[in-house]
Image: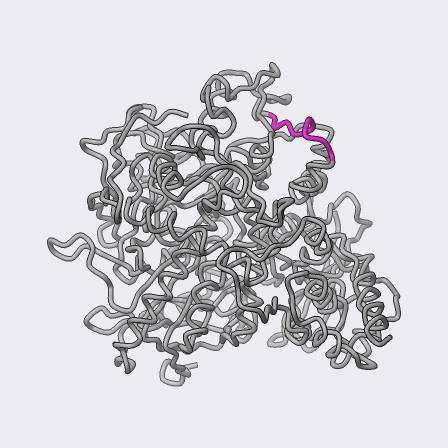
Amino acid sequence: MRFRIYRYNPEADKKPYMQDYELHEISQGMMLLDALLLIKEQDPSLGFRRSCREGVCGSDGMNINGTNGLACITSLSDLKEPVEIRPMPRLPVIRDLIVDMEPFYKQYRDVKPYLTVKDPLPEVELKQTPEERDQLDGLYECILCGCCSTACPSFWWNPDKFLGPAALLQAARFIGDSRDQATAERLEALDDPFKLFRCHTIMNCVQVCPKGLNPTKAIGDIKKMMVKKSL
Amino acid sequence: MSINDIQRRRFDTLIIGAGGGGLRAALQLAEADASVAVVSKVFPTRSHTVAAQGGMNAALANVLPDNWHWHMFDTVKGSDYLGDQDAIEYMCRAAPKVVYELEHSGVPFSRLDNGKIYQRPFGGQSQNFGGDQAARTCAAADRTGHAILHSLYQQNIRAKTHFFDEYFAVDLLKDEQGNVLGAFVFDIHTGEELIIEAKTTLLATGGAGQLFRTTTNALINTGDGMGMALRAGVPLQDMEFFQFHPTGIAGRGMLITEGARGEGGYLVNCEGERLMERYAPKAKDLASRDVVSRSIYTEVKEGRGCGPNRDHVMLKLDHLGEAVLQKRLPGIRQTCITFLGIDPAEQPIPVYPTAHYTMGGIPTDRYGQVVIPVKDTPEEPVHGLYAAGECACVSVHGANRLGGNSLLDILVFGRSAANHIIETLKETRYHRPMDEDSIAQAYERLHRWDATGDGESVEQIRTDLKKAMEENCGVFRSQDVLDNGVKQVSAIAERLKHARINDNTSMFNTARVEALELENLMDVALATVYSAAARTESRGAHSRIDYPDRDDKHWMRHSLYSLEDRKLDYKPVRTKPMSVPSFPPKARVY
């Protein structure tokens, strides 16, 4: 199987280039990460992040044949040859497929992604009905891989002002949590022409999310809550 | 960069590792206004805690009657009486409080109709000291580790913990008296080295599941903290006890949570027989993990395995119905669809015992202080050094860990280590001067990989190591096989000294990181095979066909492996709990 991989080592290369690799030992059920690990055995200088191998840790987000995804849960049998692999778009490249995620993490921190309870805490758990808990399904499972935000044109244009789908999904996760007591502050903080409202429902985020989450819907729900609040 | 130009930074506490143990400790310390540096070779939410599925044990009694003392009994029995009963009592008593704290910090636990935290049955749990099955495992669907790790990271953002993300810790730094004073680290992004001076250092680096070829563990689980401790002169405890999880996806290793059996799933052999009825008539599929793994292994060995090669058994979940699977086990359902093209709502899952958990580790007391034998004292604290979580051995898991006790361990002892550190900091006002030799040693160890020229590749040596461990240190062991393991691993360790990476670049040099990881893994492998070859009994996960019985008279003691001369030493099990009578060793049946 043939692969074309983006290479760039700022210490050694004047500019990025694409390098071809070929693997002969492809077996059924192999994932792209398995292939990358084999390629790295041939060429240990190839840089990419990886850890859990099963789509939970969010390390190996990359652009695969033009679409963002996680290498570890992308089946080789679904990919057209040569498989073209590039770093996730828009973030600064550190080396090869490794990008600097800090702008993405900063957006995450900016939405104050932590439960805020103002009342005194009980000596046992805060109660939450199963129905209230269901509201968090589709929101809490995010693994911060960055596939969604780096696929979003609004993020490409305004990464410093628009918060991007991943951070906004987190905002929705806490706004939607029946235990959280900072809803008003959270909505107010997002009431800005860019932070939230630069989402133009292009829906690339939904298309690429490896966990099947729907940030566009979460953003829509936040917008609805804002309207409701202003009435 | 020359060794004299290396920048130095000072913190009250250095935490190495940003999984559940490290982050729980960091939170406790940050809230006590200590200055904390958390060094992690990956961004915190990539740590392996994220992959924990089924849940965390605490006797909340939300579903069935329960109390901490029953939990303690089950844990002591599960440990095959090698666990230290004071630490086990401490953990089981603390469990409910620690779960409530997590809930308050935002963990989205699944819920019962009355609004309380959902709890499911797990293996080795009982009511009333060995009676009916208990339901003690607090769960967020089958993503409990993810839910906990992310919530803890989020609370650390609130607490403004200082993170050094994607920094690799090379070695601990000491003074001439042996006090631990921080660590020598480097920034993986730039290659720049940094000396972190700290009054107290906590190792929370996780386990070493990469010792084996087929493993549920992430690629980052290379026993780094254990390697650092060994090189700092600390022995490793009980390393022969390595847990093989009964239900990894056959041939691939992805974990299928014990919660799948807790929710009512069961194992069948090629004849469609519920195999666990034969091996554990009472607990059946919810016997302890060591018992279930041996049962599966035996079924396959005796020709009752499934598939064309008869090399696995099947885990049946389809009778639970799609609704239950989607509600309680959505993650493993997706994993099966992704990796096997099988929907467990319709078809059984092929499973086989898979390397999962390092019961042994850096010896500590229940305050997380690293303790070593000094002259006639078996447990003397190493000043300034703490360890918590899978890299540590308190020991609450003894010879076999119960499912759901791992998340509990990291959180209880991450927290208790932080509390002890807070007390220590009150008495430690200044940073002590370091021994410059200790810096030079770490520097040399790192720069040894700058050498170019001919030499074997790290990849080849790593592949051979995992194969040797899998073939010689698996579910069932014997003297011949273990001696062969010692021989093979020793030879592979020798080869590593001459290996080369031929990549001298500084920026995000993953080849260099992998070489350093393999050095850690190699020392942990040696500790494991040496300790295993010496223990001539069967206890918990260490199962010897040539010594099939537990031998309390000679072996109810902890192993201690030291790097120097690869020497083994032993210390007694702490059988006296804090406040209740001891649980004396009994035959262990499920």
Quick check: B438 left or right of B62? left
> Which quadrant would the N terminus of chain B be assigned to in this image?
bottom left
Residue under the image location 73 percent in, 49 percent down: A74
In terms of depth relative to the viewer, which is nearer, B481 or A3?
B481
In terms of depth relative to the viewer, which is nearer, B346 or A92?
B346
Q: Residue furthest bottom?
A: B5
| Total numbered labels placed on residues in the image | 0
What are the residue bounds of the magenta stretch? B314-322
Q: Is residue A53 visible?
A: no
- Indicate the position of residue A84 as horizontal and vertical percent values: 77, 58
| Residue B315 lies in the magenta stretch | yes
- Indicate the position of residue B365 as horizontal and vertical percent values: 28, 55
* Residue A204, above or below B586: below
Residue under the image location 31 percent in, 29 percent down: B538
- Indicate the position of residue A189 as horizontal and vertical percent values: 73, 79
> Which quadrant would the C terminus of chain B be assigned to in this image?
top left
In terms of depth relative to the viewer, which is nearer, A168 or B526?
A168
Residue B127 found in image quarter: top left
Quick check: A53 left or right of B210? right
- Indicate the position of residue B37 as horizontal and vertical percent values: 44, 74
Quick check: B27 left or right of A48? left
Q: Residue furthest left?
A: B376
Q: Is residue A119 visible?
A: yes
| Residue B418 lies in the magenta stretch | no
The image's colour scheme reads: one colour
* Residue B539, above or below B219: above
Residue B228 found in image quarter: bottom left
In terms of depth relative to the viewer, which is nearer, B80 or A125?
A125
